[in-house]
Image (cartoon, coloured by chain):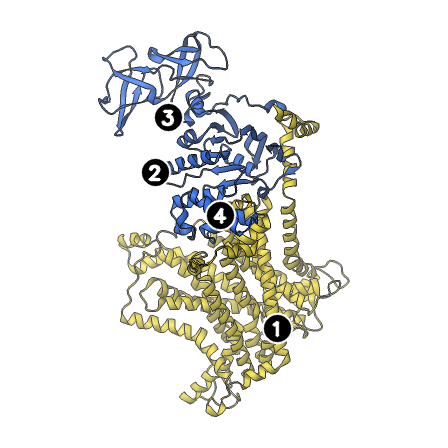
Chain colours: A yellow, B blue
Amino acid sequence: MALTSSAAPAASGTDAAGAPRDTGTPARERRRGQRRGTGFEQAMRAVWVIAIVALIGYPVAQVFGQSFVADDGGFTLGNYGLLASEPRLVEAILNSLWIASGTVVGSLLLGLPVAWFAVRTDLPFRRFFRGTAVLTFAAPSFIAALGWILLLGPRNGLLNTTLMSLFGLESAPFNIFSPWGIIFVLSLFLYPLVFLPVSAALGGIDPALEHAAASLGASRARVLRTVTFPVIAPALIAGSILVFVSAAVIFGPVAILGAPTGFQTIPTVLLSLMQFPPRIEAAAVISVPILVIIAGLLLVQRRLVGGKKFTVIGGKPGRQELTHLGPAGRVAGLAFCTLVVVLSIVLPFGILLATSFREALGRPFGADNFTLTGNYEQVFSQPLITAAMGNSFFLAVAATVLALALALLASWLVHRTKARSNAVIAPAMAAPLAFPGAVLGIGLIIAYAAPPFGLGGSLTILLIAYVGSALPLTFAYVHAGMGQIGAEVEEASRSLGASWARTWRRITVPLLRPSLLAAGLLNFVLLFRELEMSVFLYTGANPTIATVLYNLSNESLYQRVGALSVVILLINIVVAVVAMRLLDHRPGESRHRRTTPGTDPYASSEEAA
Amino acid sequence: MTHLVMSGLTKSFGTARVVDGVDLSIEEGEAVVLLGPSGCGKTTCLRMIAGFERPDAGEIRLRDEVLVGGRTFVPPERRRMSVVFQSYALWPHLSVRENVGYGPTTAKVGRAEVRRRTDEALAMVQLDGLADRYAHQLSGGQQQRVALARALVNDPALLLLDEPLSNLDTRLREEMRSEVKRIQRSLGVTMVYVTHDQAEALSLADRLVVMHDGRIVQVGSPEDVYRRPRTGFVARALGATNVLPATVRGTGGGSVALELPGGVPVEAEAPADGPLGEGQAVMVSVRPGDVRLTPADPGHASGAVVREALFFGDHVQYSVELPGLAEPIKATGPSVGRLQPGQPVSLGVDRGAAAVLGDRPGTTATGHVPAVPAPVPGRSAA
């Protein structure tokens, strides 16, 4: 019974609390125990909260706040009267809706047939067409828009001049500087948002559903209408909503293609409102309804994707019979899918490449108008551009690292701690998806540009913007990766004498490597050429590669635009290829292959110790 | 010498109290098995010993050191407890050698020593040749051996095993069971083993701890707990049994004479908790293997009739209907001379094979009765 006496201090402490052992005390003890046990955890949670508030919460709250601030600093709803008194604000909203609706239609016209051909038929090269759809989405849309100016510009567009000389036309048949041109370019860029979910849904339909309908005497058209379409409808609507939201608030292509005719949508009118003298309250007033509408639409989209109502999708994918296309069908299918690839990738980026080797824009293509390095030399000899390269590189790397750290912290909280508030973390990390770059940019300007922070135009404010916008994608990858790693794998390390820090260094992070790499490289690619927020935060002091390119195109220096675009695309491609190589093996397997019998496996263990 | 002491351990998740005042002390070199159905708190107990969970109340001490209690909390890495997980938790990015060498490497004992101890541990689990493989290149049984070697290499103060064999198929499980026993014996390591499998529990334990609803319901040697279960719950946890109402017919000489419905006589050891009076109604546990069936004439005294006879090759499982009992009695018999359904039989129970339970008659049908608290030291301290 020695234990009884030595256990006494703890027990008497309990007694001192004055409650009978079986009722109040355990609960009280428990609460105290949890508080003690989670000191580190609570500190980490606090770090996360502060980071999210600083990156997202505070700037967005500032946008809302400013829309209610009167000139004298008091509260007012009067700012919203601007919507009535300034017709160009209403016009910009209507233009955004018009562009967004048109792009939805365009994306469906492109995405649905490609999805059906690629998933449900025996079309040759269908894997290739699937792959290029993903690739399109990773390509920068404003660079594609620049390419289309060179192809379908009303005066010098290569396709226009070719068609004019072929058919003896008086004027250019197409004008890319129009709402139709914008819709055309945006559809070619955004159709993957329809293609990807719809092809997943098509591929996931249990063939038994369709067979059942067919066996009951339904014709093929009737099966398509009564079974197939209703099953893919949620994916189709969800994809369309994403296209709508993206097209309504995208800045780059609209600004480039709309500027010559003064066609403005929400993001471009926001930018003009923020030019000197800035009219922050007007920008805030136009931002708030946009945020509310987008949030509503995204909630609907979430519901459709996560809804239980359509869980029939499942079954045994991959066991579907592919529709056999006849010769005519094959030709038509190949022609259509090839056309989509040519229009979305080959033509716009090809013309930029070609233009980057042109000596003068005014003269036609030809051997006498060729310079291999001239335009590239010009680009790289400009200190502004080399500085921009450096800035973009630094910002992309730093923001990627910080976003990864924050995503690691958040997914650690979600997966390894038990707090009711954990349910907030995932939605908070995904929230930036709902904020257009323009609105987030304006929020950051209101929040941090002026004293006491005084960050206007600095690299720091760009870094804050980039980290915030990188969170959703980073978290999605890291969170999924963390979900694959059982807590026991970490506990095993702890029980063998490794501290928490060593466990993370030697076990958790190495196991997360594929997710971290994927998220990191993808972020780098997207942030390196970020335009949507940069253009709002740019004040002339710290150029980034995208703002430089944007300004070059405003000055119509298209050979340099071509050269710089090619450089950006090359960096994108190299990083993407490296990413695929690094990701294309299982951990352990490659190590095993490399570990020859003679090498000492402890070398790696020792260096970490 | 007392090695590990748990006293008044309590842990809740949300509103559910998973561990509810557990007191247990473990001797050095002892193999203790925690047995119980899922959700009985056995794994949580193990995780609290390892330091993965923090008890809401109570104390754990290793020799003279308080691991947790009051304001003290020793983190897992300073407890010298090696854990073998149900999932094995092998690190897929490290080779077998790196997995096993992780503990010594972390302890920075020097390269040569790491290698020596790793080789020794791998030899112990008979995996000498596979040191450079990765987990996904091993079979389930081999993975289990790596997990064991990784735990043993650290010379743990306590070896904790959480249902380590439940992912293996039956034959491998039997093989690994004797392997664990052999290694534990030869190293003399103190072991806490959590399982819901009665065969593992009975064969591995020096001392068996049966848990139910977060409490310890019985502690004792495997034979003792098997032969003298204190409740129907414990009796069922250790294998198929019949929990039957009986009437006390006489006591004396350390044994009790009882009578089952139908007048079947049974003799049991007298329970320790208190004397039984003649005519008292009690519950008894009788294992199917201890029930003897002999053919009888129709209309014999007890009225028992075979309802079902399932042939298993080496034995036959019978289900016998006895008038006055809601559920049939389970019995096993030799496969030679098996009885057919409909055959009237007379029942007999081997001498001393029955156990008088602490459950009150009429409440035991489901086995979820309030358990008789086990008289464990330290409980009165609070």
**Mark 2 → mark 1, Cα distance in angstroms:** 64 Å
Name the residue carrying label 2: B171
Query: On the image, which quarter does residue B205 sit in?
Result: top left
Residue toward you, A592 or A163 = A592
Q: Are marks 1 and 3 on the same chain?
A: no
Residue B294 can be seen, yes or no:
yes
Q: Is the residue marked by circle 1 packed among few (<14), some (14-19), or many (20+) residues within 10 Å?
A: some
What secondary structure is marked by label 1? helix
Residue toward you, B98 or B72 = B98
User: For the residue marked with disc 1, what is the amino acid?
Assistant: Gly
Looking at the image, the residue that sits furthest to the right is A72
Query: On the image, which quarter does residue A390 sit in?
Result: bottom right
Residue A452's disc is: none
User: For the residue marked with disc 4, what is the amino acid?
Assistant: Arg
A511 sits to left or right of B335: right
What secondary structure is marked by label 3? loop
What subunit carries mark 3? B
What subunit carries mark 4? B
Please report contact status of discs 1 and 3: CB closer than 8 Å, yes or no.
Answer: no
Name the residue carrying label 3: B240
Mark 2 vs mark 4: which is more N-terminal? 4
User: For the residue marked with disc 3, what is the amino acid?
Assistant: Ala
Residue B116's disc is: 4
Question: For the point 50% across and 47% down, which residue is it?
Answer: A489
What subunit carries mark 2? B
Residue A390's disc is: 1
